[in-house]
Image (spheres, helix red, strand yellow):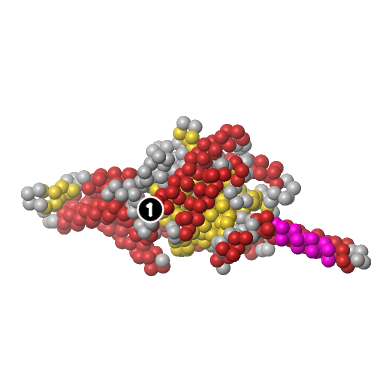
């Protein structure tokens, strides 16, 4: 970071502290205003549900389980169970509003070898999936990186991915995604998964205020649009007519094992497994495809099928009817009203037994929310700019449930190939004298030194520490990352060496005075930044 950038960085940090405080104050005030009020939301049984979907949630598509080949369901479901049985699904420690929290759902990232996915300050490393006809990914010693059980599981997820790649495209073409009225609105990422307590409660009203403020600012500056364009190296989401999903995050949660699920606070939709969020780190406008598999958690629950659950609640309704009839003497208006309310409650209960995805328009407290129930095997797609203009959450049902969420992750700075290239670039500046076996820096140009120190920090904080923190927990099942990370650690040690060499130059009285000052600047900035970041990571380790 250049000194000017550094100042800006700290100024921004201070500003974001101030705005956090300001937001908290606003939040408290708004919570009071909102009181017990709830914003309406619609479910399939409500009149106007389809119209609302068409008008305000047009980028959402449901694919019922029957759209997938039977064999694929079986393979995918058994793959998900394998991942869970093998202990691959773990709760992530993510950062939300300067705090480290565990996600309620357990997760694993499966996808293109060497890819990572970054969300809420946490980088996940892929368990590689295996393509048709391939023997299985080999690690550097040419041994398969996972055992055959896991390989088959990942292969099934790759197959599902292939299905989604072509099906999403067809669905989008067939339907011709209508532009929702929110298309012209701006959105900003709000804290996502793992979002907790007071944070969700007030966000909606706050969003409205922020949006108004933003619009004013934009009018002032004459800008129409505030979201940034994709980096130029980002491939388009759809190459040659195909959507290229490159990773999937597997989610798992058994609600009976969770004691503290948060209530959805704006609409009263029920308990949330994943709080309101936009998906992060995706190629702009790329779709997301989700496979939902609800399964009985405990062996003893295995006999209770969804049909049984439905049957049971019908039984109860019947019992009620019988009781009322049994009273014989005719029913008063009040009694009828109570009766109806009782039945409505039953309906709501029944609806909440099912897992659902909840959607809302970002920056909007007028459009009703949407709650879409998902039967086991159902899939849904979020297409066009739904993920940008809307937020989604996952509402827990009664059974345990897996989901496989396929995405087109930005790969410009998140792949092993990318970071390896960066390391080589930095190490090119290190010269080894073969005779004396001493090392020295080739270029002492401040811009070159700056670039190297930036790479040094990137390797340490975006890769090594992220890997030590959460990534290497997968090494037990899959050796794919082990060697590359060892190599990266060696490269990092060389970079530490280079920083030491730079210090030697700066301390050397024979170095020209003018250059010394500039070099010292670069060095001091890098060291101060790293010291701060290292402290943040120490705190994270202590909490984990
Ligand atoms: O499980 C789902 O249906 C979606 C989960 C989700 O939103 C996510 O993982 O980002
Ligand atoms: Fe999501």
Residue closest to the eye, 519 or 459? 459
The answer to which quarter of the image holds residue 490 is: bottom left
- Above or below for 537 versus 514: below
Left or right: residue 38 versus residue 125 is right
Q: Nearer the viewer, residue 325 or 150?
A: 150
**Residue at position x 79%, y 64% in the image:** 319
Q: Which range of residues does the magenta coloring cover?
A: 310-323
Which residue is labeled 1 in the image?
147
In x, y percent, where is residue 456? Answer: 28, 52
Q: Where 219 falls versus 534 (above or below)?
A: above
Left or right of 415: which side holds 141? Answer: left
Residue appearing at x 53%, y 51% in the figure: 77
Q: Is residue 56 visible?
A: yes
The location of residue 217, given as percent across then percent down, is 53, 46
Tell me the quarter of the image containing the C terminus: bottom left
- Residue nearest the viewer, comparing 53 with 30: 53
Name the residue located 29 percent from the left edge and 44 percent from the top edge.
421
Judge whether residue 293 is colored magenta. Answer: no
């Amino acid at each position: 970071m250049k000194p000017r950038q550094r100042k800006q960085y700290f100024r921004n940090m201070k500003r974001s502290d101030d705005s956090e405080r300001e937001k908290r104050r606003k939040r408290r005030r708004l919570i009071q205003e909102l009181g017990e009020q709830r914003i309406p939301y619609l479910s399939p049984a409500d009149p106007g549900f389809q119209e609302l979907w068409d008008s305000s949630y047009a980028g959402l598509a449901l694919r019922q389980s029957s759209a997938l080949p039977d064999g694929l369901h079986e393979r995918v479901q058994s793959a998900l169970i394998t991942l869970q049985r093998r202990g691959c699904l773990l709760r992530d420690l993510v950062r939300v509003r300067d705090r480290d929290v565990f996600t309620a759902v357990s997760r694993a990232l499966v996808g293109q070898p060497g890819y990572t996915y970054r969300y809420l300050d946490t980088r996940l490393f892929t368990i590689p999936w295996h393509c048709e006809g391939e023997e299985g990914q080999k690690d550097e010693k040419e041994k398969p990186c996972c055992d055959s059980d896991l390989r088959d599981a990942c292969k099934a997820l790759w197959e599902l991915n292939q299905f989604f790649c072509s099906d999403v495209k067809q669905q989008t073409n067939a339907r011709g995604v209508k532009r929702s009225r929110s298309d012209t609105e701006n959105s900003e990422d709000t804290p996502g998964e793992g979002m907790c307590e007071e944070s969700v409660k007030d966000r909606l009203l706050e969003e409205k205020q922020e949006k108004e403020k933003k619009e004013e600012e934009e009018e002032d500056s004459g800008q129409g649009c505030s979201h940034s364009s994709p980096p130029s190296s980002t491939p388009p989401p759809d190459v040659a007519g195909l959507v290229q999903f490159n990773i999937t995050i597997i989610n798992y949660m058994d609600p009976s094992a969770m004691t503290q699920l948060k209530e959805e606070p704006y609409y009263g939709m029920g308990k949330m497994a994943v709080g309101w969020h936009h998906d992060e780190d995706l190629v702009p406008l790329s779709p997301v495809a989700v496979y939902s598999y609800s399964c009985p958690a405990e062996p003893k629950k295995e006999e209770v099928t969804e049909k049984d659950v439905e049957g049971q609640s019908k039984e109860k309704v019947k019992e009620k009817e019988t009781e009322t009839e049994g009273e014989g003497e005719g029913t008063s208006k009040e009694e009828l009203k109570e009766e109806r309310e009782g039945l409505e409650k039953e309906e709501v209960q029944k609806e909440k037994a099912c897992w659902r995805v909840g959607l809302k328009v970002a920056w909007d407290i007028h459009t009703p929310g949407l709650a879409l129930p998902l039967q086991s095997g159902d899939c849904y797609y979020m297409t066009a700019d739904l993920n940008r203009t809307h937020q989604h959450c996952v509402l827990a049902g009664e059974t345990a449930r897996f989901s496989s969420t396929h995405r087109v992750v930005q790969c410009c700075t998140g792949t092993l190939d990318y970071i390896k290239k960066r390391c080589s670039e930095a190490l090119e500046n290190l010269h080894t004298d073969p005779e004396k076996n001493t090392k020295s820096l080739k270029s002492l140009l401040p811009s070159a030194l700056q670039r190297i120190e930036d790479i040094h920090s990137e390797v340490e904080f975006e890769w090594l520490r992220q890997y030590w923190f959460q990534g290497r927990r997968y090494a037990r099942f899959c050796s794919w990352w082990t060697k590359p990370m060892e190599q990266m650690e060696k490269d990092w040690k060389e970079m530490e060496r280079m920083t030491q060499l730079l210090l030697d130059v700066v301390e050397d009285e024979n170095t020209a005075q003018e250059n010394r000052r500039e070099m010292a600047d670069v060095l001091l900035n890098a060291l101060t930044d790293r010291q701060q970041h290292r402290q943040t990571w120490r705190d994270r380790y202590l909490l984990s």
